[in-house]
Image (cartoon, helix red, strand yellow):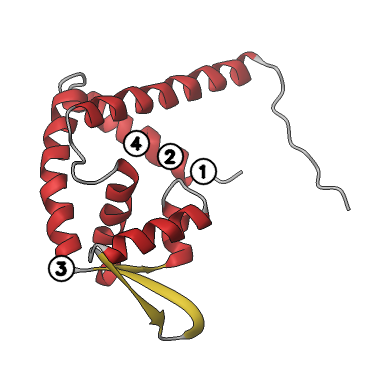
């Protein structure tokens, strides 16, 4: 059975949505380059920091590997290899999921948490400089509301 394709009509709204997406994406790229150039993530790579940050926000500082994969922008095989590297460095630990013999939990170690906090402090300063410096508080609230709405939308 063929899967039906949903295509947006070539309307002014469709074009505007594409322009807005392009702007959002390019802004994220530009900011990430600034953060990297400022050394925000050292000694980590940005995606490694994303994994540690995501785990730091999770209940018990651990997630199933598949749930972690849902929250970061990388393929499952790439994430598995990264978790291997982070585990060798003592920043995360794998353990069997208690309610699923095939499931794996990835947890943040104390060393991983300490490094995430250290890198995070520098990153927050850069965010304040580049994002907070460009937008006032009302604009920041609007940006937060809009990005939250986009993340939650499921057509």
Q: Earlier in the sequence, mark 4 or mark 3?
A: 3
* Residue 56, horizontal then vertical, whole percent: 24, 60
Determine the secondary structure under disc 3.
helix
Q: Which residue is mark 1?
A: 153
Determine the secondary structure under disc 4.
helix
Spatial separation of the CA atoms under disc 4 and disc 3: 33 Å
Determine the secondary structure under disc 1.
loop
Residue at 24% of width from left, 62% of height from top?
Answer: 89
Quadrant of the rendered image containing residue 68? bottom left
* 134 displayed left or right of 80: left
Residue at 38% of width from left, 73% of height from top?
Answer: 105
Badges 1 and 2: C-beta atoms under 8 Å apart?
yes
Q: Is residue 90 above or below residue 133?
A: below
* Residue 142, horizontal then vertical, whole percent: 30, 29
Quarter containing the C terminus: top right
Mark 1, other Cα within 10 Å: few <14 / some 14–19 / many ≥20: few
Q: Which residue is mark 2?
A: 149
Residue at 27% of width from left, 56% of height from top?
Answer: 52
Badges 4 and 1: C-beta atoms under 8 Å apart?
no
One can see residue 37 in this view:
yes
Quadrant of the rendered image containing residue 137? top left
Spatial separation of the CA atoms under disc 2 and disc 3: 34 Å
Q: Which residue is mark 3?
A: 110
Q: Which residue is mark 4?
A: 145
* 87 displayed left or right of 130: right
Badges 2 and 4: C-beta atoms under 8 Å apart?
yes
Spatial separation of the CA atoms under disc 2 and disc 4: 6 Å
Q: Is residue 30 above or below residue 102?
A: above
Residue at 19% of width from left, 61% of height from top?
Answer: 112
Nearer to the camera, 28 or 112: 112
Mark 3, other Cα within 10 Å: few <14 / some 14–19 / many ≥20: few
């Amino acid at each position: 059975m063929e899967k039906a394709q949903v295509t947006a009509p070539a309307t002014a709204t469709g074009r505007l949505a594409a322009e807005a997406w392009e702007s959002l994406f390019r802004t994220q790229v530009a900011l990430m380059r600034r953060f990297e150039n400022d050394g925000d993530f050292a000694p980590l790579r940005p995606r490694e920091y994303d994994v540690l940050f995501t785990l730091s926000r999770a209940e018990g500082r651990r997630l199933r590997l598949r749930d972690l994969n849902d929250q970061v922008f990388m393929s499952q095989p790439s994430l598995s290899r990264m978790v291997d590297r982070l585990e060798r460095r003592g920043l995360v630990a794998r353990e069997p999921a208690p309610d699923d013999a095939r499931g794996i939990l990835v947890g943040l170690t104390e060393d991983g948490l300490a490094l995430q906090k250290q890198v995070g402090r520098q990153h927050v300063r850069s965010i304040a400089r580049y994002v907070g410096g460009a937008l006032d508080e009302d604009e920041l609230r609007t940006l937060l509301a809009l990005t939250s709405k986009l993340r939650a939308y499921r057509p």
